Image: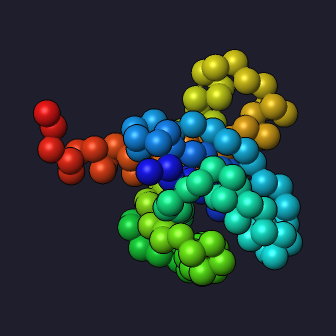
């Protein structure tokens, strides 16, 4: 089952995709469109092209574990995309995913300007990989 991982932000949406076995997340793209309708349209196209069966959204929680306005906004967008695509969605704790993405890119020698264009899709990979890893821990090991 292919899964899309989404890091939904105010300026950009990072998109990642899993392999068909649901083991590995890879970066796909960053959507810089600010118009909500165009965001939904583009993500619907990506989901169809990738033959995704599930959407995993990063849930922006506060460090104390509570949900704020940004989390509510993200979940509303997730519901809207789910209704449009007919795909189920899950919310996944994304605390520190962007900070980790910045660290990974910095350690990889990616400069500031290039890092800005890549950080969202790397954050989406971190979100999706966390979800995939949690699912493999629940599956019986052979």
Q: How is the image coloured?
A: rainbow
Q: Residue at 40% x, 51% y: name it.
A: 131
Q: What is the residue that sits farthest to the top in this orientation?
A: 109
| Percent coordinates x, y for residue 139 in the rendering | 20, 47
Q: Is residue 54 left or right of residue 111?
A: left
Question: Does residue 19 show up?
Answer: yes
| Percent coordinates x, y for residue 38 in the rendering | 84, 69
Q: Residue at 64% x, 58% y: name it.
A: 47
Q: Residue at 57% x, 75% y: name it.
A: 86
Tally of marks: 0
| Percent coordinates x, y for residue 28 in the rendering | 67, 42
In the picture, residue 26 is in which quadrant?
Answer: top right
Q: Is residue 97 left or right of residue 106?
A: left
| Percent coordinates x, y for residue 96 in the rendering | 51, 49
Quarter in which the C terminus is drawn: top left
- 133 or 50: nearer the viewer: 50
**On screen, residue 8 above or below 105:** below
- 70 or 141: nearer the viewer: 141
Question: Does residue 127 show up?
Answer: no
């Amino acid at each position: 089952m292919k899964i899309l991982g989404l890091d939904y932000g105010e300026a950009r949406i990072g998109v990642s995709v899993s392999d068909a076995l649901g083991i590995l997340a890879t970066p796909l793209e960053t959507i810089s469109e600010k118009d909500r309708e165009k965001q939904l349209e583009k993500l619907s196209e990506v989901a169809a092209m990738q033959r995704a069966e599930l959407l995993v959204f990063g849930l922006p929680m506060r460090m104390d574990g509570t949900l704020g306005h940004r989390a509510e906004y993200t979940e509303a967008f997730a519901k809207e995309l789910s209704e449009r695509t007919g795909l189920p969605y899950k919310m996944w704790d994304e605390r520190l995913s962007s900070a980790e993405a910045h660290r990974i890119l910095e350690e990889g020698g990616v400069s500031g300007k290039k890092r800005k264009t890549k950080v969202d899709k790397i954050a989406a990979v971190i979100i999706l990989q966390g979800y995939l890893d949690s699912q493999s821990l629940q599956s019986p090991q052979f």
